[in-house]
């Protein structure tokens, strides 16, 4: 079984962006407990598991990222207690990045999959493909995203969860249970999740569909599936002062009186745009 991600076509002998190669699944275990106060500057006595080694699938740390305390604790509960966590919120709030940046500080391998209209059931489950073995064409089963991730210590994130096609969503439903096994019918094989496998999702509407015209293409999701998510956390836009600090962290040259005034004006315009109704935006 290959350790290469099904979404990554790079050979494993090439250097990754992180300077580390993907480690065999059995060699990766969180070996240390660290405090949330130390890692995220959040007032809590919660201890979270941390990997000591960084795998090639661990996201890079963004030092300018600002964490929402409540959402951070919800996501950390998912990492610590193996709970399924969905993060809901408006566009641009940083839902997926929030999960990624937590994973980055835990050294937890992470894989993001966007459930757009092109992701099919075969992409998730796997399919037979013709490959060359010893100069001969043979038919070989290639694992999809779900079985590949299930057998590894990976945080799998389904982006745009409420835009997934119905046939795709029912593939996911079985693994939403805490110890949900995944059956590959074509292989007569039952896959048991790795102890450090974690599942997350991000959504704009939590399965309610395009009610206000903001999110065309979102689906009405099966309530039985939504009910299987253990934790649903809502992520809103940050306060203006926090957004100003983020911009200043990324553009230190503007950290002066004139620059700060400009950035505050930019943030104020962005805030007004977010509060405008979809119809008002269309007329404008």
Image: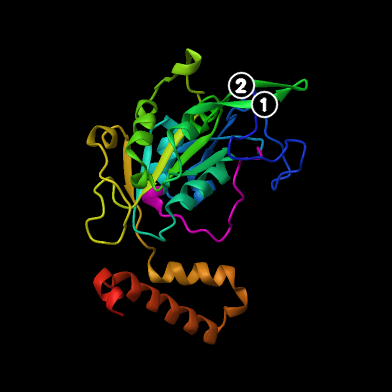
Does residue 259 sit above or below 1 in this rendering? below
On whether residue 58 falls in the magenta region, the answer is yes
Residue 209 position in % (x across, y down): 25, 50
Residue 140 — which label?
A: 2
Q: Residue at x 44, y 37 (%)?
A: 120
* Residue linked to disc 1: 131
Residue 219 — which label?
A: none
Q: Secondary structure at mark 2?
A: strand
Does residue 235 sit above or below 165 in this rendering? below
> Who comes first in sequence, dot 2 or dot 1?
1
- How many marks do you count on the picture? 2
Judge the density around disc 1: few (<14), some (14-19), many (≥20) Cα neighbours within 10 Å: some
Q: Taking the image as drawn, is residue 191 in sight?
A: no
Query: Is the C-beta separation of discs 2 and 1 under 8 Å?
Result: yes
Residue 240 position in % (x across, y down): 39, 71
Q: Residue at x 38, y 59 (%)?
A: 91
**Picture quadrant where residue 110 is located:** top right
């Amino acid at each position: 079984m290959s350790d290469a991600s099904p979404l990554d076509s790079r050979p494993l002998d090439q250097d990754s962006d992180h300077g580390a190669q993907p480690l065999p699944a059995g060699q990766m275990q969180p070996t240390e407990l660290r405090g949330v106060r130390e890692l995220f500057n959040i007032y809590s006595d919660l201890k979270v598991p941390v990997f000591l080694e960084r795998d090639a699938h661990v996201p890079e740390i963004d030092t300018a990222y600002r964490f929402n305390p409540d959402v951070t604790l919800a996501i950390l509960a998912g990492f610590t207690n193996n709970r399924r966590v969905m993060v809901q919120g408006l566009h641009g709030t940083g839902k997926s990045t929030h999960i990624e940046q937590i994973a980055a500080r835990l050294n937890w391998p992470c894989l993001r999959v966007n459930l757009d209209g092109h992701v099919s059931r075969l992409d998730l489950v796997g399919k037979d493909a013709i490959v060359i073995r010893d100069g001969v064409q043979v038919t070989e089963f290639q694992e999809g995203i779900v079985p590949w991730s299930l057998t590894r210590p990976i945080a799998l994130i389904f982006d745009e969860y409420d835009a997934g096609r119905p046939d795709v969503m029912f593939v996911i439903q079985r693994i939403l249970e805490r110890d949900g096994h995944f059956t590959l019918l074509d292989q007569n094989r039952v896959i048991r999740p790795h102890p450090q496998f974690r599942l997350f999702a991000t959504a704009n509407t939590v399965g309610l569909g395009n009610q206000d015209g903001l999110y065309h293409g979102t689906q009405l999701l099966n309530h039985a599936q939504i009910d299987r998510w253990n934790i649903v956390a809502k992520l809103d836009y940050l306060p203006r002062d926090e957004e100003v600090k983020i911009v200043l962290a990324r553009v230190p040259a503007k950290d002066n009186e004139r620059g700060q005034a400009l950035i505050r004006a930019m943030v104020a315009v962005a805030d007004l745009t977010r509060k405008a109704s979809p119809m008002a935006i269309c007329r404008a």
